[in-house]
Image: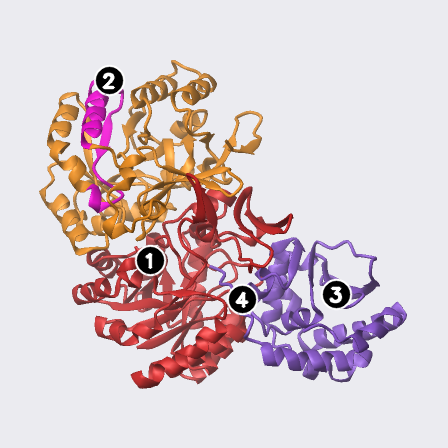
């Protein structure tokens, strides 16, 4: 297991951002954010690849010059021939470690060190051990897992570091169909990349105007933002050594600074919660999955009373 | 299909003990034929289920844990964990498992009040039995015999016409 | 092509066998089963009896252990696998890699099918499951077109089973936490989606409002048929418009594509609906059996019967057609 102190990682940007915005975001991360690992690359929709491709090598170089460990993310849903080809080429050609987000990447990565992303179903130690035997060295667990499962998996698996999503809207579902394009009057095959208009996701409300989910192309994410802060200490104690910050359209350098301060005892978690709400006011915070409740719930520490996140 | 008036009207005046006697007889004859019926309910066996035909002046309360059935005259009502309201024809169809409950429950022909999961468990348990009302009740239907045979025939005619809503 | 039919109760099981199923799939009455609905499914004894019945009629039985093992409680799944093997299951339908590895090692002779919940949607993914666990058949996610399936079939070394009729998941199966986000209960962990325990119907003026957990999923005006609040088939607001954001409440029907599916290399056609009643199972299975055995020119008339059965219900060919995306 990882004997060193816990570190932060930055997950892939799940949304479609314009190329320049994407590049500048990573330049700033390279220069200012206290994250050790940066997972980079399109994860949600293969149609978006051309937006970031022109900037990829410059961004990777800048991140590495700043001492970040760069990991390349694979697509979550691989269906088309061209998506299979893309995944194969990524695995074959990359000199960087790769994070697998679907079964095809798992297959292709067998026998070489790699990471497992949160979109691969790891619900128990038997699965984690199987993946470890095949070469996985780091596993980011699915956001749906409660703390009890996390502790069981970590204690039952040797030779792998474990990572947990600590900040960001939670990936909840992915489809062959693009609800985002449909909402704007298009179908996936002629989507005109309308998801670029919503760099933080397109909010979806109930008919009673209660905020509920957000659309991100073919992916559906939570409206609430997962925020594990008071939980960090227990997670570290149970052996989790990496905490993932999933980029939202907010000051992620400030988010990273805040998590770093809490993780290393420079800030109280309770103060961090108040501060985080200022940094990312767009979404209510939630931690329900972690506490074995509905994912949208916010469970305050000590009082241990859940109330549903509403806006 | 609603219960024809000439059949329903006498029930408004027949003394409850008489109705209840007949219903209890039907209930026990049904359970004799299908002893495993309530075992499928699992944790929901301890709940109380009310059936409110909206074309009869009566309410039926089923308590699987005892097991027992009792009858009340409206507007008196039973404290139940889950209740289902609708035409007697549909309630009996539900009993026979001849209509798909997805369609029944969630079309507006039946209204489920209270513990939806318990009612779903009951409907699945009923569907898991091969209840055939005319056969299973035989002579036990007593004063309900014409009602039972009429509705059973209607159920067979319409058994599959009510498929409207998929679960998932 | 085989016809694979659902059964949620022993009665529905016998109906499916009698109606001409080549195989019936079903599961135990616990969370090892992705249709872990109240009042449904099989005890060990019931399943043993069902398998004997099926054997006598030359029908196979597939047992679905297609949820993901809860960490620390793996023995529930291991015992279910042991019992399924002991009872004589013709195949186990599995989704969890850990459970697949266990079954492949402990019961190397046992036929292993990959559940749709495992989300194997491309040749490399299927090859992984064949190489690592000896999978003999894969149930494909409902995210592929028929030409995708044909291309896939040419590149893999196991049989293909596809859903052709019944409920339709809009999201990639086994990769959806929408239900647990709203209710704490998920298909992957609890074997339920949009569970009845969290469903509430509420009258609001003339409207009937369906709720799941604390969220409104749909609102039905007085004369509109109400639906069950399955989350991905709800009506929502996006910006200023209301509508079915993910999918209308429709069900899947691609039986008119039987020949194309056969040509694509599909070995088995699967009917969804372990939670549907015995009457539904009997009618759908017998009709699809006849359609499958009929000459193409007679098929349409047979299938029309099923549309009657789906009166008022719209069907879709879903992802099997590219336009759906």
In the rendered structure, the answer to whether residue C81 lies left or right of residue C129 reads right
Viewer-nearest of labels 3 and 4? 3
Instruction: Work out how far the residue at label 3 is from the one at label 4, CA to CA, in angstroms.
Output: 22 Å
Viewer-nearest of labels 1 and 2? 2
Residue at horizontal 50%, vertical 78%? C14
Label 1 in the same subunit as label 2: no
- Which residue lies under the disc numbered 3? B67
SS of the residue under disc 2: helix
In the rendered structure, the answer to whether residue B132 lies left or right of residue C231 reads right
Chain in orange on the image: A
Most foreground residue, C5 or A179: A179
In percent of width and height, residue C178 lies at: 43, 46
Magenta segment boundaries in residue numbering: A19-48
Colour in which chain B is shown? purple
Whether C48 is drawn above or below A73: the answer is below
The quadrant the C terminus of chain C occupies is bottom left
Instruction: Work out how far the residue at label 2 is from the one at label 3, CA to CA, in angstroms.
Output: 70 Å
- Which residue lies under the disc numbered 1? C100
Q: Quadrant of residue A115?
A: top left
- Which residue lies under the disc numbered 4? C43
Badge 4 crowding class, 10 Å Cα cut-off, few under 14, some 14 to 19, many 20 or more, is some
Badge 1 crowding class, 10 Å Cα cut-off, few under 14, some 14 to 19, many 20 or more, is many
């Amino acid at each position: 297991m990882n004997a060193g102190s816990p570190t932060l990682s930055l997950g892939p940007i799940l949304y479609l951002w314009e190329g320049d915005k994407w590049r500048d975001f990573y330049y700033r991360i390279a220069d200012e954010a206290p994250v050790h690992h940066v997972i980079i690359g399109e994860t949600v929709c293969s149609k978006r690849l051309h937006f970031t491709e022109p900037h990829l090598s410059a961004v990777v170089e800048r991140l590495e010059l700043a001492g970040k460990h760069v990991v390349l993310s694979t697509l979550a849903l691989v269906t088309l021939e061209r998506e299979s080809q893309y995944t194969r080429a990524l695995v074959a050609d990359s000199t960087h470690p790769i994070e697998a987000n679907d079964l095809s990447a798992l297959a292709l990565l067998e026998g070489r060190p790699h990471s497992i992303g949160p979109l691969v179903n790891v619900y128990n130690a038997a699965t984690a051990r199987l993946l470890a035997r095949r070469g996985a060295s780091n596993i980011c667990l699915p956001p749906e897992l409660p703390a009890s499962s996390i502790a069981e998996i970590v204690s039952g698996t040797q030779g792998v570091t474990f990572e947990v999503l600590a900040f960001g809207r939670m990936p909840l579902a992915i489809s062959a169909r693009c609800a985002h394009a449909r909402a704007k009057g298009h179908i996936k095959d002629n989507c005109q990349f309308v998801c670029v208009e919503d760099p933080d996701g397109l909010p979806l409300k109930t008919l009673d105007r209660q905020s509920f989910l957000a659309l991100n192309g073919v992916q559906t994410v939570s409206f609430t933002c997962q925020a594990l802060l008071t939980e960090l200490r227990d997670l570290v104690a149970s052996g989790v050594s990496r905490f993932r910050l999933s980029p939202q359209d907010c000051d992620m350098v400030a988010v990273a600074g805040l998590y770093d301060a809490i993780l290393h005892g420079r800030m109280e978690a309770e103060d961090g919660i108040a501060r985080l709400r200022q940094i990312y006011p767009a979404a209510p915070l939630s931690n329900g999955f972690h506490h074995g409740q509905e994912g949208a719930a916010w469970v305050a520490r000590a009082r241990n009373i859940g109330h549903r996140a509403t806006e | 299909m609603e219960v024809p008036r000439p059949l329903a009207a006498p029930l408004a005046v027949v003394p409850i003990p008489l109705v209840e006697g007949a219903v209890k007889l039907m209930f026990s004859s049904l359970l004799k034929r299908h002893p495993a019926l309530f075992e499928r309910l699992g944790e929901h066996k301890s709940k109380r289920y009310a059936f409110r035909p909206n074309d009869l002046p009566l309410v039926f309360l089923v308590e699987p844990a005892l097991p027992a059935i009792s009858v009340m005259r409206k507007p008196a009502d039973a404290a139940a964990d889950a209740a289902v309201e609708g035409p007697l024809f549909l309630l009996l169809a539900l009993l026979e498992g001849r209509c798909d409950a997805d369609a029944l429950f969630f079309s507006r022909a039946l209204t489920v009040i209270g513990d939806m999961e318990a009612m779903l468990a009951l409907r699945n348990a009923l569907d898991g039995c091969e209840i055939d009302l005319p056969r299973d009740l035989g002579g036990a239907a007593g004063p309900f015999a014409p009602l039972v045979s009429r509705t059973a025939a209607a159920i067979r005619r319409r058994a599959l016409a009510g498929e409207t809503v998929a679960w998932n | 092509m085989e016809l694979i039919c659902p059964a949620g109760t022993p009665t529905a099981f016998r109906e499916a066998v009698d109606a001409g199923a080549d195989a019936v799939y079903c599961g135990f009455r616990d969370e090892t089963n992705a249709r872990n609905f109240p009042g449904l499914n099989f005890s060990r004894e019931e399943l043993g009896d069902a398998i004997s019945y099926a054997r006598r009629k030359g029908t196979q039985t597939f047992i679905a252990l297609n949820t993901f093992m809860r960490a620390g409680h793996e023995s529930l799944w291991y015992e279910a696998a042991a019992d399924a093997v002991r009872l004589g299951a013709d195949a186990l339908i599995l989704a969890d890699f850990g459970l697949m590895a266990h079954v492949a090692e402990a019961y190397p002779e046992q036929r292993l099918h990959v559940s749709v919940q495992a989300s194997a949607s491309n040749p490399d993914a299927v090859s992984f499951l064949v190489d690592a666990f000896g999978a003999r058949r894969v149930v494909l996610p409902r995210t592929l077109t028929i030409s995708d399936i044909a291309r896939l079939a040419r590149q893999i070394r196991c049989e293909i089973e596809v859903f052709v009729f019944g409920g339709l998941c809009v999201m990639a199966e086994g990769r959806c936490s929408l239900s647990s986000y709203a209710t704490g209960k998920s298909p992957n962990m609890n074997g339920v989606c949009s569970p009845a325990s969290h469903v509430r119907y509420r009258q609001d003026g003339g409207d009937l409002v369906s709720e799941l957990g604390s969220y409104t999923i749909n609102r039905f005006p007085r004369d509109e048929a109400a639906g069950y609040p399955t989350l991905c088939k709800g009506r929502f607001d996006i910006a200023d418009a209301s509508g079915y954001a993910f999918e209308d409440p429709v069900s899947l029907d691609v039986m008119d594509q039987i020949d194309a599916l056969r040509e694509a290399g599909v070995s088995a056609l699967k009917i969804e609906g372990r939670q549907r009643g015995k009457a539904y199972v009997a009618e759908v299975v017998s009709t699809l059996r006849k359609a499958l055995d009929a000459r193409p020119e007679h098929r349409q008339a047979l299938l029309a019967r099923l549309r009657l059965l789906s009166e008022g219900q719209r069907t879709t060919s879903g992802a099997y057609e590219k336009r759906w995306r």
